[in-house]
Image: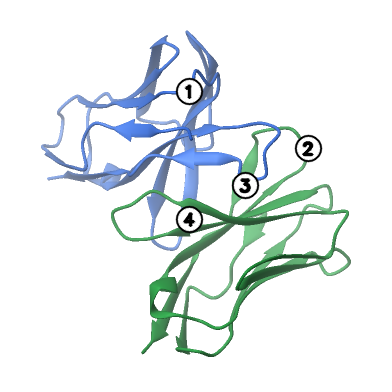
Chain colours: A green, B blue
Amino acid sequence: DQQVKQNSPSLSVQEGRISILNCDYTNSMFDYFLWYKKYPAEGPTFLISISSIKDKNEDGRFTVFLNKSAKHLSLHIVPSQPGDSAVYFCAASAASGTYKYIFGTGTRLKVLA
Amino acid sequence: DVKVTQSSRYLVKRTGEKVFLECVQDMDHENMFWYRQDPGLGLRLIYFSYDVKMKEKGDIPEGYSVSREKKERFSLILESASTNQTSMYLCATFTLGTAYGYTFGSGTRLTVV
């Protein structure tokens, strides 16, 4: 049973527009969430995180929103750039201070120039 | 910054071969992980180790084993490679108490023919 789902396997967005990547989870005990970006032939790199005590975290062009009641988080990239084209994974943990994370299936973002 | 190094970027092996994937980290971290990434399935945990000679099965350990004789090195072993083990393999460490969690290696793209 997939506890963390990214229902859109791919997304295409024009350069300069907003990219919105979604992640849904089923376990209400999840309290810390991470987003990673992965280029082909490279390992994933950390992008942004959010704790369940917040509903928003922002870092430059990247903002993550958390809706606990809906068990939904989203990553917004504004403005999107061609270099943002990558696969994005969300990951969730049910215990802060632990390394036990569940990863989503990933969304491939393509930003069109 | 933690550096995680995977010895091979690309490997091609024959069915039935015993395959060793090596991973080295340079920051004395206790926790090390092996994941595989497949399209549509995301990152799936194969094994992890929380100390030298200590290991735990992840979600998909079948057909794999691991070795952790030294803290900095974590090896993934495919006892008898099969075509369904063709995948991208990612090694990682995890830093507790930080926002970013995992540090991944660059990955090994393994093809079993």
The residue at the point 84 percent across, 65 percent down is A55
Marks 1,4: beta carbons within 8 A: no
The residue at the point 35 percent across, 30 percent down is B63
Q: Which structural element holds mark 4? A: strand
Mark before the other along the chain sequence, 1 or 4: 1
Q: Nearer the viewer, mark 1 or mark 4?
A: 1
Query: What is the number of the mark on residue A102?
Result: 3
Task: Please give the residue where the numbered disc 4 appears in the rendered image.
Answer: B42
Real-space Cα separation, disc 1 to disc 3, in angstroms: 24 Å
The residue at the point 53 percent across, 37 percent down is B59
Q: Nearer the viewer, mark 1 or mark 3?
A: 1
Task: Please give the residue where the numbered disc 1 appears in the rendered image.
Answer: B27
Residue type, mark 2 in image: Ala
Real-space Cα separation, disc 4 to disc 3, in angstroms: 10 Å
- Expressed as whole percent of the image width and height from the top left, the position of residue A78 reads 59, 81
- Expressed as whole percent of the image width and height from the top left, the position of residue A73 reads 72, 67
